[in-house]
Amino acid sequence: MQCPFPGMDPYLEQRGVWKTLHNALLTDISRTLQPLLRPRYWVAVEELTYEAVPDDLVLLGGPDVSVVDLRPPPGGATAGGVALLPRVEQVGIPLPETIREKYLEIRDPQTGEVITVIEVLSPTNKRTGAHYDQYLRKRATILGSHTNLVEIDLLRQGQRMPMRRAPGAVPYDYSILICRPRLSDRADFYPLSVRDPLPEVPIPLRIGEPDVPLPIGAVFAAAYDRGGFDLIVDYRLPPRPPLSEADAEWADVVLRQAGLR
């Protein structure tokens, strides 16, 4: 089925859906670019794995050694001279979780040199805390090298990536950032609203070589259709996170015209 929205579908950010879409997008981007890049370059699907403590749990911290007064409180019950515990609570233990973040690298097949990194941001990249800091460290390493970075953000939720924009710049829902090495601190930024179609993205290669066009809109449409996302999304409900009032009214019209409401 064709996606009912002209660009990114705001319903696909929900938990349990985005990971499948993320993997599908990376696979389809690789398949789209590889014929355009051969024989000079090849596209590798890479994965960064790390352990992180979930940010939504309260850490139970305290001193390594404590001096405890075991004397029962005045009037407290005892059993054989031992103070009874007043109550038992169930608590969550912040066990480490394994985070696997996939991304693409355009490489020289002869030398293995990484020419361009393509990131499709995930909720863990944009989650304030250790996950966000981990991604920023990786991002800084790329930006400090001779490697191009293409950062595709199709998520309305989460922390925005740091950048300097002109005062009064228009707000945005999604974005595409293209950073080329040796161009000081300047980059090409494409802000997009939820109503915009996804554009053709110029993928940079080595300096002096022409960019390769990536039709991210067509890639997304194909991933949506092949993934059958219309089967697992209930368009009768509002998306999560919610849209603005104006965009919610627009989305309602779009979905009614598509016969989904």
Image (cartoon, rainbow, N blue to C red):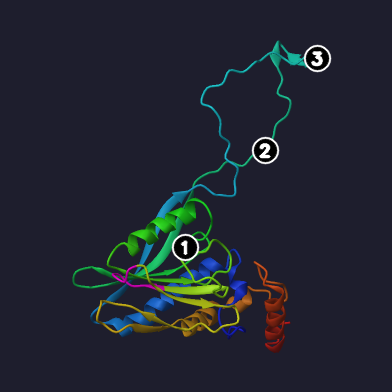
Q: Where, quadrant-wise, is the N terminus in this rendering?
A: bottom right
Q: Earlier in the sequence, mark 1 or mark 3?
A: 3
Three-letter residue code for mark 2 = Gln
The residue under label 2 is: 90
Q: Look at 52% across and 69% down and name the residue there.
A: 20
Q: Which residues are magenta?
A: 178-184
How crowded is the residue under tag 2: few (<14 C-alpha within 10 Å), some, or many (20+)? Answer: few
- Residue projecting furthest to the right: 75
Indicate the secondary structure of the residue bearing disc 2. loop
N-terminal label among 2 and 3: 3
Vertically, is 97 above or below 164?
Answer: above
Name which residue type carries label 3: Gly
In three-dimensional space, the C-alpha distance between marks 2 and 1, rounded to whole angstroms, equals 39 Å
Look at discs 2 and 3 and give the one toward the viewer. 3
Q: Which of the numbered marks, if any, corresponds to residue 55?
A: none
Residue highlighted by disc 1: 162
Residue at 29 percent of width and 63 percent of height: 145
Q: Which residue is mark 3?
A: 75
Name the residue nearer the viewer: 205 or 23: 205
Residue 194 in the figure: left or right of residue 161: right
Looking at the rendered image, the disc whose residue lies closer to the viewer, 2 or 1, is: 1
Looking at the picture, how far across and down is residue 243, in whole percent?
A: 67, 72
The quadrant of the rendering that contains the C terminus is bottom right
Q: 235 or 211: which is nearer to us? A: 211
In the foreground, 4 or 165: 165
What kind of residue is marked 1? Pro
Q: Position of residue 97 (x, y in %)?
A: 49, 50
